[in-house]
Image (cartoon, rainbow, N blue to C red):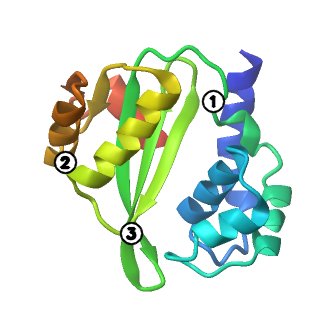
Amino acid sequence: IAGSVKLFLWFCLWPSFLDGLRTPVPVVLYALYLRYLGNSLRRVARALEPFILVSHVAVWLWEKRLWGFRDVFASRCRVSLFLIDDTEVGIGGSSAWFFIAYEPFERRILGMWLSWTRNELVVEKFLRGLVKRFGRHPVYTDGGNHYIAACKSLGLEHRVYSFGSWMHEVIESV
């Protein structure tokens, strides 16, 4: 319960933490996720180069500013399903896609992915990483064709959550 309270407080205080940031919030979260996976500051800055130019010092400052970010990501938790959503993000005048996988019962973010395109290949690569890290589980999405095709090619069970259901409310609040 303490972890879920920390997660709730972290997201409630999120806007005050991010005041003054010129970088889009999903890019910052993706950078912190890459850092959480064990990448160096310079490697994270290099990974963000196709989207936005940042220095390793900027990544370090984000990490310092968002002190509680490690509690949000799942290192070891019981995974029963993948709840996945995508969001269009404006980066430097262009549109990019931010994918997020969430475990609703443990209240943990399982993975993130930032891409210029939203198609079956991108989703398949994202799902393949999740399966490699957490095993095979049912995938719940909003029903986009790219999700259906990716799940079919990986042999994963795909389910669609309905608008207004508790799953829809959970993933949209993340």
- Examine the image and state in which quarter residue 137 appears: top left
Q: Quadrant of the image for the N terminus?
A: top right
What label sits on residue 74 in the rendered view? 1
CB under 8 Å between discs 1 and 2 = no
Q: Where does label 2 land, which residue?
A: 146
Q: Where does label 3 land, which residue?
A: 96
Q: Residue 83: x percent and y percent?
A: 38, 31
Q: Quick check: 92 left or right of 148?
A: right
Whether 42 is drawn above or below 122: the answer is below
**SS under mark 3:** strand
Q: Compare marks 1 and 3 and give the one earlier in the sequence.
A: 1
Determine the residue positioned at 73% across, 46% down: 38
Whether 18 is drawn above or below 158: the answer is below
Report crowding for label 3: few under 14, some 14 to 19, many 20 or more residues within 10 A (C-alpha): some
Report crowding for label 2: few under 14, some 14 to 19, many 20 or more residues within 10 A (C-alpha): some
**SS under mark 1:** loop
Q: Nearer the viewer, residue 144 or 161?
A: 144
Whether 17 is drawn above or below 104: the answer is below
Determine the residue positioned at 13% across, 46% down: 145
Which amino acid is tagged 1?
Ala
- The answer for how far apart the CA atoms under marks 1 and 2 are is 25 Å
Q: Quick check: 150 left or right of 106?
A: left
Which amino acid is tagged 2?
His
Q: Residue 14: x percent and y percent?
A: 68, 52
- Residue 143 in sight from this viewpoint: no
- The answer for how far apart the CA atoms under marks 1 and 3 are is 24 Å
Which amino acid is tagged 3?
Ala
CB under 8 Å between discs 1 and 3 = no
Q: Nearer the viewer, residue 39 or 28?
A: 39
Q: Residue 33: x percent and y percent?
A: 64, 49
Determine the residue positioned at 65% across, 78% down: 22
Q: Quick check: 168 left or right of 42?
A: left
